[in-house]
Amino acid sequence: MTPPFRTSLGVALLLFLVSVASAAPSALIVIGLTANETDAALWSRLADRTRLQLAARGIPADRITVLASAEGAPVTRERILASLTTTARDVGADDDCWLILFGHSAPARDSQPAFQVRGPRLTATDLQSALAAIAGHSLVVLNTSQSGGYLPFLKNLPNCTAIAATAGIGETGVPRFPEIWVDALAETPAAPFTTLAARAAERVDAFYTTNGLAQVESARLLAGPDREILSAPFGVTAASAPAAVSASPSAAPVLTSADIEIPTTTGDSEFSPAPATDATRSLLAEAARLAPQADGHSALVLQQEIALTLNADRTSTRSTRLRVLLLTPAAIAEWADYTFVHQPPTETTRIEGARLILPDASALVLNPRRLADNTPVSSELPVPLHLNLPQAAPGCIVELAWTTELRAAYDLPEFYDELELARSAPVVATVLTLRLPKTGTFNHQLRNLPAAPAPVESATEHSRVLAWTLPALPAYEPLPYDPPRRDLVATLAVSSLPSWEAFDTWFRRIARGSDEIGPSVRARAAEITRLNPTPETRIRAAYEFVSSLRYVAIEFGIHAFRPRTPDTVLRNRYGDCKDKANLLIALLHAMDLPAEFVLLNRGSSTDPAFPGWQFNHAIAHIPAFADQPERWLDATDGTTRFGVISPGDLGRQARILPPTGEARFAPVRLGAEITAVTDTWTFETHTHGAWLGRVERRFTGLADYELRQQLGNASPALRAFALHQQLAALLPDATFENVTLTNLDDLAQPVGLTATFYVLAASPAPRPASTLAAALAAPTRDRPIALNDGQPLRYTQIVRRVTTGSETAPDLEDDPPHAPMRIGENTLTQSFSRPDDHTVLNTAVLDLNTPFVSSSDYPAFVQAFRIWRELAAIPVDHHPFSKP
């Protein structure tokens, strides 16, 4: 039988040995209460990087604990204190015990700082008591706002060293120190605690200095036997000199998102070489297999991962990861010499990682911190954020990761954003994630993606999460005469606007009072009334007066949306589109004529089924009344004649906001004047085989507008050059003289030009519609074509050939055929006549009634157009309808 004292001694010895064996460095990383999903993602990323680097420092992975909120399991004061109690039990007297807090702090009721968690806060007194129970050396990193206030509470703990991101409770802003401290730890995981603190503080100071910003945070360190609270650099010399880096493979942080994992590097170089691995060889092999899907493009996007996070305060974050195969040298400029959207403070982009995998499977890995240090800063203008990947060549794979934070647009009542998914190269696979606040109304729309699958839904503490794995996306290749980009590109749209009625209420509220008709407007309206006896002439006079005012866009603050008062615009003699529309409407109302304010998306499109800010333009609408037709009047620029629809307006869904009553949508309809081009050519025979002649061109509608836009401000020499170029495209071998253009400043009359010419040719004939011929140069098209800005067009060419002396005009077949051709609603005709013995007329007419030609109708339309154009260009005495 074993004596009792021997049993007790054995148990005690066993417990001692277990205690010694279990004692080891440990770390507790805590993510506190986050304000939104963006904060949560940032703190989570920093906590994960910290975990990796502490492991690289030598702390066993099973001794590193991360406390983070999950659905139904928030971080609380009790959970933190329980974890610290466990740590106190397990840590030996010679061990380091790390405590890293990420989040926000604020004064408690007794004015001491408190870490923000769900339920009761973790106060400085709580922290003091918990750390006092730890036998080892406590290393505390207070990565929170107002964190300096904790340090006085920790001064009586001789084994505690602590760094606070801020000097005291008064520094309330979100500090930059936490992220910079994690970067310093990643660069030199084995560096002493005080060196890491000094290096991070030094870089925070440098950030504020180089960016010309007032410094709103100053780190403080509690250290040493004297228990002093020190200001940077904390008595540490050569803070920036790197300490020895752990050789542990886990020291290399990795950016992970779904499937794209991009390693980052540390050290003094922007790029560090990395050897070939099985993973990089596998990526290159898969890229080679997928390369045929590039379909002739210079690059192939193997995978993209895009996440849009919307916060309750309407700030948002876009996170993007790309993996791109370079196939030709042209791809290098686009994908390996990359410029990011970066317009602080409204859009701030941070490059998180980049890697270039070379054809031999080795790689160059970016050090994001060193890139940021080397990026020049200008206090005058934002410097473009640019990344050049050295050694890029065809056969390489480019991997990029960046995040863009967007400031809330508080001048708008709700959130609205559109995120294009298609790129200039085909995309093999897309992982799309949308995070929306759990509270509030949010709508989303995947546009131009007919085969998009339903999203997979989940939730986080702050957000409702929707995730899609999308099929392959074709490259977006814009072509001339395309429909609006919004109608072609695969896009995710997100809006918090619950209804169009809510939008109408907001717009009318901010515009209240802006339509007030003052005395100067009434006086101008009275003058227009006196000089113009009918409603039509009064409308026209008001329109032409407002059109003549200068267009100046001054869109700061609320005036980006609220029109200036009509009296203000009249007094200034300038305004932007909404100002001029508002003045025009006020003049018409002062004459007791109906008029309504209109918002539309000029040159683009608006989806009435998806409420959101989809407008960029304002015009006036006059509903039909008495004997007057409906009119859409765009007084923005001074080159649109009365009755003409400005380019980019026709067919757009317009939000009409009448002075009273409900707003409504209606498409902008055609005005009284359609686009027409009429060319009349007269050829008269002359000696030595030459022809003398005269040409007259007349333009209405959009053709009139475009000529005024092109030549209105041109110098005389440039105007003459442009007119000769235009005429030479119709009759290339002719010499034109006496070219005369009507007064472009006179909007009362359509534009016209005349010229005389001579041409050395046996049987010359002009070729009509040269501009249209250029638009229809390709035999096929994979999308609709929008000719003449989508407006109907009539093109007429009349060729009159007159013989002189005894020569007579050739006879024609009796009742020659007109050769009509019809493609849908579009008609192309050709007719011939012989009004007298010396004259033959060849008349070609193109009626483009449906200027949007579908891709299926396009080949037949092109063929008909070319036949029509060739027939119009054949001299009449060579024509098949002439008698021999």
Image (spheres, grey):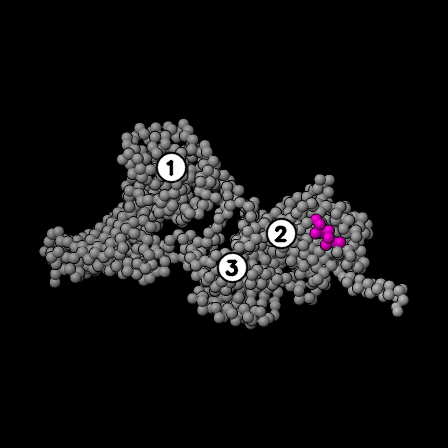
Quarter of the image that includes the N terminus: bottom right
Graded by Cα atoms within 10 Å as few (under 14), some (14 to 19) or many (20 or more), the crowding at tag 2 reads few
User: Seen from this angle, which residue lies furthest left?
Assistant: 806
Instruction: Kindly identify which residue carries mark 2.
Output: 72
Callout 3 secondary element? strand
The amino acid type, in three-letter code, at marker 3 is: Val
Q: Is residue 230 left or right of residue 461?
A: right
Instruction: Kindly identify which residue carries mark 3.
Output: 431
The residues tagged by marks 1 and 2 sit, at their Cα atoms, a distance apart of 53 Å
Residue 596 numbered tag: 1
The amino acid type, in three-letter code, at marker 1 is: Glu
Would you place residue 73 above or below residue 58 in this image?
above
Magenta range is: 77-85
Tell me, yes or no, whether the two marked residues, 3 and 2, touch with CB atoms within 8 Å: no
Q: Is residue 169 left or right of residue 482?
A: right
* Pick the front one: 142 or 245: 142
Tell me, yes or no, whether the two marked residues, 1 and 2, touch with CB atoms within 8 Å: no
Task: Find residue 496 and report its horizontal and vertical position in percent.
Answer: 50, 46
- What residue lies at 51% left-to-right and 62% top-to-bottom? 303
Task: Find residue 208 and report its horizontal and vertical position in percent.
Answer: 64, 48
**Nearest to N terminus: mark 3 or mark 1:** 3
**Nearest to N terminus: mark 3 or mark 2:** 2
Tell me, yes or no, whether the two marked residues, 3 and 1, touch with CB atoms within 8 Å: no
Q: Nearer the viewer, mark 1 or mark 2?
A: 2
The residues tagged by marks 3 and 1 sit, at their Cα atoms, a distance apart of 44 Å
- What residue lies at 50% left-to-right and 41% top-to-bottom? 413
- What residue lies at 70% left-to-right and 49% top-to-bottom? 77
